[in-house]
Amino acid sequence: MKRITINDIAKELNVTPSTVSRALSGNTRVSIKTRELVANKAKELGYQQNVIAASLRKGRSDTIGMVVPRINRHFFSNVISGVEEILNPAGYTLLIVQSGENFIKEQKAIGMLMANHVGGIIISLSVQTKTYDHINGVVKRGIPLVQFDRVNPDIESSKILNDNFTGAYLATKHLIKSGYQRIGHLAGTRSLKAYEERYRGFVKAIEEEGRNVEDCLVYENTITREAGYNSIKKAYAHNSRPDAVFCAGDYAALGVLDGLKELGVSVPEEFGVVGFANEPFSELIHPTLSTVEQNAFEMGTRVATAMIKNLEGKHWEKEEVIPTRLIVRNSSWKK
Amino acid sequence: MKRITINDIAKELNVTPSTVSRALSGNTRVSIKTRELVANKAKELGYQQNVIAASLRKGRSDTIGMVVPRINRHFFSNVISGVEEILNPAGYTLLIVQSGENFIKEQKAIGMLMANHVGGIIISLSVQTKTYDHINGVVKRGIPLVQFDRVNPDIESSKILNDNFTGAYLATKHLIKSGYQRIGHLAGTRSLKAYEERYRGFVKAIEEEGRNVEDCLVYENTITREAGYNSIKKAYAHNSRPDAVFCAGDYAALGVLDGLKELGVSVPEEFGVVGFANEPFSELIHPTLSTVEQNAFEMGTRVATAMIKNLEGKHWEKEEVIPTRLIVRNSSWKK
DNA sequence: TTGAAAGCGCTAACAT
DNA sequence: ATGTTAGCGCTTTCAA
């Protein structure tokens, strides 16, 4: 079963391939009649454009590459959905690659996308990434770049970010207003701006109340369930134990709840917990977890919109910030 | 910044592009010395193959297309990871598209993949899909096809399946052995073979005990949390109410637990619940949910392996079944 | 062991 | 409004 090409259509209609090509792309310099003729014949023969040939000729393609750390994270898979929502109807195709939070794989992914001549690249950096030659290479080649969530601020590109600062600020403020006295923070790695911002939001809220951050228990690099569990156990051995924590991630918060249950501490009566990310499980556990919601889907649509702007030629380097929202559930007092 | 082509390398080395092409692909008909020379010059100039041009010329590409209902489902995103684990090291690139459980989008996705001249297609059908011309078109064009999980048995292709039957059988058997008397089943749509099999496994276990399926409460098309909730409420109004249910999905089981909590029925003392899929939340909720685990990652590696076999030319149509495993947690008695 | 030449299917500049 | 021509970068047959 041979594929139908524009030459086949041209022959059947006694016109040249150029005319068919123009007709198919809706060029107005082809008569309406011919355009209809071509369209009908194309449908009749079951013609399907060979986009490979087209992009070779045009020197660019309508495929957009996207590099994410992990596809099976709620946040990323929803950003992807948002991106597709915009990109597909606009005629673009998404090529998704996972870096697996691995620097080498991230480099390879970029190389693969370049070899495939993608029209643009969307990326959220791996935690391991500390050097940026591979990303700069993309920019140097003139390929439109959009960074999101885990971005490098020094690279020239559109950047779409979550409002981590405000989310963290509101979460901490909420714990304070709820009457908790000694509020701790389980932070992520400071080298990632997202976590750094959450830390800063926490600090702002604490200081605004005239309290002293030095008095707060802050654990760094504590984002897994296990780390959360261990840290609350350790905190309880501390002489100035906290009575609430704001966690930079829901998994850490989950670990904290595990530990508190084991210690026989009641939540939210004796201890308040707020997480970050609104993972699907956060409303399913007991008690349900107060958390900060990131609008992943909207982030995706904004990412895609920025990419299209870039593809349309305008040097679109705007930095956009997506608002976050505090969701109060049962792991903290409603106040 | 112009891209380096094999012509650039050829000119610098005073050989022809053909030689460079052969050298780069490791053809032994090129002298070792020339091959080294070419390799070094390629690295020096930063050459990167233009896979678009190569696949146009070769008439096939090393890109594999994959159509899944939704990327943000635990099961599918893990199958994808498994596929990538095998495909990427073998030099293939995965192009992922979501059908969003929508028939039209599924058709479009297939069309897009064909237009991109993918070397093969991997698919798990949408729930809506009832006609199969688009899939048959793939087979007719001679493009290797691998179906997984949600497959159409009549289409000639490799098929990788979960052992839904045994999983369901073991789950139901477990409820019986635990001493529950009247066991119900929340089923999925019967038009999907996976759900049909789960139903059959349930029936087999029931009948094997000399019980009568007609006595069991079976609700069809009940896989969401809400549907699970509603059905348990309805079941409790029933004159021969069940004291256990095997659910074809974890979300329905979650809804059942919601309903039971509201009804003041204690689990597992008065009522047993087993789900299916081992969704991440199933071990986080209270009580933790007994369920049937599907090995999504392994399914992915098997899918990819089957695809490679097909690409290597052998007509590889084997049907493979991945074992499932019962995980007993606190929503049913351990027996 | 290497070169010459053709062509994959399409688009676009330049005719007419 | 349509045709002519060239070529994107690569692979591959045929020839030397």
Image (cartoon, coloured by chain):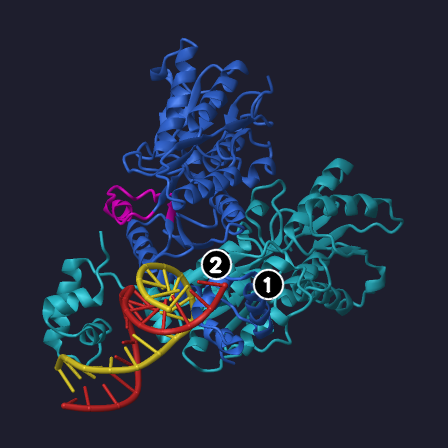
Chain colours: A cyan, B blue, C red, D yellow
The local crowd at label 2, few if under 14, some if 14 to 19, many if 20 or more residues have their Cα within 10 Å, is: few
Q: State whether residue A301 appears in this view.
A: no
Circle nearer the viewer, 1 or 2: 2
User: Which residue is label 2 attached to?
Assistant: B29
Picture mark count: 2
Q: Disc 2 on helix, strand or loop?
A: loop
User: Which residue is label 1 attached to?
Assistant: A107
Gap between marks 1 and 2, in whole Å? Answer: 32 Å
Q: Which residues are magenta?
A: B121-143
Relative depth, front residue between A3 and A159: A3
Rendered position, B279 above or below A63: above
Q: Quadrant of residue D12?
A: bottom left
Q: Quadrant of residue A209?
A: bottom right
- What's the residue at 57%, 45% (across, down)? A281
Amino acid type of the residue that numbered disc 1 sits on in the rendered structure: Gln
Rendered position, A51 above or below B243: below
